[in-house]
Image (spheres, rainbow, N blue to C red):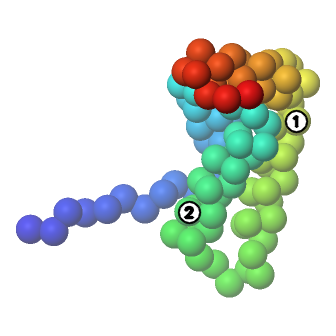
Amino acid sequence: MEAMSRSPRKVTAKSLENAALHYLQRFATSAENLRRVLMRRVERSVRAHDTDRDDTDREVGAALVDALVERFVAAGLVDDRVYAEGRALSLHRRGTAA
């Protein structure tokens, strides 16, 4: 019996926000990395729900991601400086060279 694979849901502003909040609960991240994570979700959705609308879904998804990341940075949920300091400290504790 073959395993059924679920197709990704269509991307909405709310689904992206929920995904971002869930990701931030689990991982410290930079703004650019959060953008990459969310864009992978958008890309999966676009491929699964392929429409003949000249990639409009991809563009709309990218705009939603950019707005969300900007909002999270402005709210202090994502701070690249704090992330970089924490990452450097973590690497230093492991004995990684400066």
Q: Residue at x 68, y 84 (%)?
A: 52
Q: Residue at x 74, y 80 (%)?
A: 53
Q: Tell me the tag on residue 70.
A: 1
Q: Nearer the viewer, residue 90 or 83?
A: 90
Q: Using the rendered view, name the quadrant where residue 29 is placed.
A: top right
- Amino acid type assigned to the residue bearing label 2 in the image: Arg
Q: CA distance from mark 1 to mark 2?
A: 22 Å
- Note whether residue 68 is visible: no
Q: Which quadrant would the C terminus be assigned to in this image?
A: top right
Q: Nearer the viewer, residue 96 or 49?
A: 96
Q: Using the rendered view, name the quadrant where residue 16 is placed.
A: top right
Question: Upstream in the sequence, badge 1 or badge 2?
Answer: 2
Above or below 98: residue 35: below
- Note whether residue 36 is visible: yes
SS category of the residue bearing label 1: helix
Q: Residues within 10 Å of mark 1 (few under 14, many from 20)?
A: some
Point out residue 79 in the picture as x, y percentages from the top left corner: 82, 24
Above or below 71: residue 59: below
Point out residue 14 in the picture as x, y percentages from the top left corner: 67, 38
- Left or right, residue 18 beside residue 69: left
Above or below 45: residue 15: above
Q: Residue at x 81, y 65 (%)?
A: 59
Q: Which residue is the site of mark 2? A: 44
